[in-house]
Amino acid sequence: MERAQPLPTYLAQRYQGWKATGYAENKAWYRRLAEDGQHPRAMVISCCDSRIHVTAIFGADQGEFFLHRNIANLVPPYAPDGDYHGTSAAVEYAVKALKVAHLIVLGHSTCGGVKGFHDMCHGRAPELAEKTSFIGRWMDILRPGYERLGGNDAEIDDAMLEKEAVKVSMDNLMTFPFVRDAVEAEKLSLHGLWNDIGEGGLEFYDAKTDSFLPV
């Protein structure tokens, strides 16, 4: 840890501002959160993209959402192989320990991970095709959705693939036995959403029509 550096000045100043205002004015609420623990009603799996502000979109307060971010909001299939599985661990904790009532997968427009995958499939990003690419191997999770859209033989735009990423994640969630059991017992509901960043739009996946509709 010898290379660790002090916090950048602008972040330190922002923290001091929050501590003097946001925290000071809500000290009792923060102390209650610390003492009572978390009891979120929903888990949201969203992209790492800095433009996606989940709590702002839903006007959520601290303690309301159990949040997990990764590249392209993907959920891998259930694979209890004893390896490292950050997303699967987060899902397990949310469902089995926190017992959330809703599990939401939130995709978005102009997703860099999805675009990179699309480029990789067409040979435009050979670096992602390398076995050593963490991003490329992670984005392989989306391959079944890509093939479902027709693969390299079809005209697929990024928005179609972004929404397919949401559907693939929802499909994979149901491969987790504890998720499937909770859904079948009507103790957990799954939701797929897609956010249009530029227009502020939000669409939900409707399984009956196999399409995304405006919220």
Image (cartoon, rainbow, N blue to C red):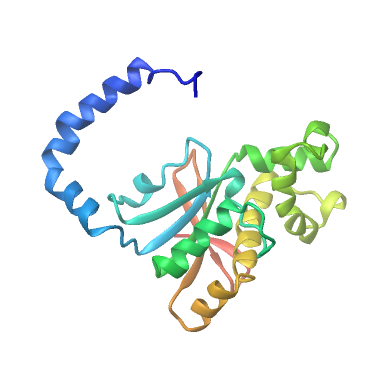
- The residue at the point 47 percent across, 21 percent down is 4
- Quadrant in the rendering for residue 77: bottom right
For residue 192, say whether it is visible. Answer: no
Q: Residue furthest top?
A: 9
Q: Residue 213: image x %, image y %? A: 53, 61
Q: Nearer the viewer, residue 6 or 141?
A: 6
Instruction: Report the number of discs.
Output: 0
Q: Nearer the viewer, residue 145 or 129?
A: 129
Q: Residue 27: image x %, image y %? A: 14, 43
Answer with left or right where residue 175 lies relative to residue 108: right
Answer with left or right where residue 89 lies relative to residue 44: right
Q: Quadrant of the C terminus?
A: bottom left
Q: Residue 116: image x %, image y %? A: 71, 37
Q: Residue furthest bottom?
A: 185
Would you place residue 140 above or below residue 192 in this image? above
Answer with left or right where residue 168 lies relative to residue 104: right
- The residue at the point 75 percent across, 37 percent down is 133
- The residue at the point 85 percent across, 36 percent down is 123
- Quadrant in the rendering for residue 208: bottom right
Would you place residue 179 above or below residue 48 in this image? below
- Quadrant in the rendering for residue 87: bottom right
- The residue at the point 46 percent across, 62 percent down is 93
Q: Nearer the viewer, residue 44 or 52?
A: 44
Would you place residue 176 above or below residue 158 in this image? below
For residue 190, say whether it is visible. Answer: yes
Q: Nearer the viewer, residue 208 or 188?
A: 188
Would you place residue 100 above or below residue 33 in this image? below
